[in-house]
């Protein structure tokens, strides 16, 4: 098996899929948008800034903060490590919320 | 470790020179010291609305911090009831607040000493109206011009 070019994203996808059984999981790498920032000087990783859109029934009846904490906990290592995830934008929804959102968008 | 962290939005005095480096074992680096915890307790209690951010409200140093400040401004949070702390000024604060809140990223918003969340959460709450409700409930908004507030601030 050849080396993955996106080990961070792979790890994220594996962990989130295993624990949350998402019906939707999008992981978008925004690192290239931030690589010129002063804070990123000297960082060689191309996997520092991510947007994650995740729909899972596991988020049912959980307030936003609790949902994000669930994801943060699963990705604890990746967030804590040197040169790991620097920024993580999360959109966490239940399947019902996603349907409602899509219905709203279809109306507009 | 300072007794209290300097508020970014109020201080224009030059920053103190960084103390000589202390050598901490990996174990110590992860644990929040009592002094730092106490200093963060004070920071969190310093105003009804507290934002730990990168940079200052006038000059944010990060897009997510900037977005958070913009949301607070659009919501009409009373500057008298707001304090911002710049984590880039103090590495104890930067790492300490992540341990304290058990939250890995900056910015972090506290309202009435309660952790609300980071930029994503603020954005979502701003869009669905729950942020406005929270601020109204806590009485932290600037009263509209010309109107006499019917309730006294809590």
Image (cartoon, rainbow, N blue to C red):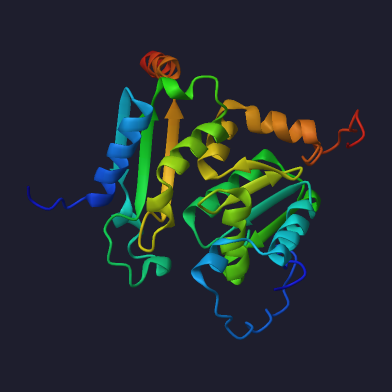
The quadrant the N terminus of chain B occupies is bottom right
Camera sees residue B59: no
* Residue at the (61%, 68%) spot, across then down: B92
Q: Nearer the viewer, residue A91 or B95?
A: B95
Q: Is residue A107 above or below residue A93?
A: above
Q: Position of residue A55 (x, y in %)?
A: 38, 25
Please tell me in which quadrant of the rendered image residue B93 appears. Answer: bottom right
Q: Is residue B122 visible?
A: yes
Identify the image quadrant of residue A42: bottom left
Q: Quadrant of the C terminus of chain B?
A: top right
Residue A70 picture location, percent across and down: 48, 36
Q: Image check: A40 left or right of A44?
A: right
Residue in the picture at 77% in, 70% down: B3
Q: How many marks?
A: 0
Q: Nearer the viewer, residue B111 or A8?
A: A8
- List x then y, in percent, for residue B127: 55, 30
Q: Residue at x 23, y 51 (%)?
A: A7
Report x, y in % for residue B10: 75, 65
């Amino acid at each position: 098996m050849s080396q993955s070019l996106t080990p961070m994203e792979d790890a994220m996808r594996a962990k989130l899929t295993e624990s949350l059984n998402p019906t939707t999981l999008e992981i978008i790498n925004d690192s290239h948008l931030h690589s010129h920032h002063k804070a990123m000087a000297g960082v060689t990783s191309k996997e520092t800034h991510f947007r994650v859109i995740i729909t899972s029934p596991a988020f049912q009846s959980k307030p936003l903060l609790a949902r994000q904490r669930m994801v943060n906990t699963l990705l604890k290592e990746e967030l804590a490590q040197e040169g790991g995830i620097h920024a993580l934008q999360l959109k966490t929804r239940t399947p019902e919320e996603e349907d409602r959102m899509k219905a709203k968008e279809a109306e507009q | 470790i300072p007794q209290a962290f300097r508020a970014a939005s109020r201080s224009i005095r030059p920053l103190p020179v960084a103390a000589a480096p202390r050598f901490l074992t990996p174990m110590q680096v992860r644990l929040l010291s009592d002094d730092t915890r106490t200093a963060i307790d004070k920071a969190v209690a310093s105003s009804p609305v507290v934002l730990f951010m990168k940079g200052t409200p006038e000059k944010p140093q990060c897009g997510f911090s900037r977005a958070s400040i913009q949301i607070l401004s659009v919501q009409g949070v009373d500057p008298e009831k707001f304090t911002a702390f710049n984590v880039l000024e103090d590495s104890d604060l930067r790492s300490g607040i992540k341990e304290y809140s058990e939250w890995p990223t900056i910015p972090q918003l506290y309202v009435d000493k309660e952790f609300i969340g980071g930029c994503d959460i603020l954005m979502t709450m701003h869009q669905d109206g729950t942020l406005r409700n929270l601020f109204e409930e806590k009485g932290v908004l600037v009263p509209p011009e010309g109107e006499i507030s019917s309730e006294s601030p809590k």
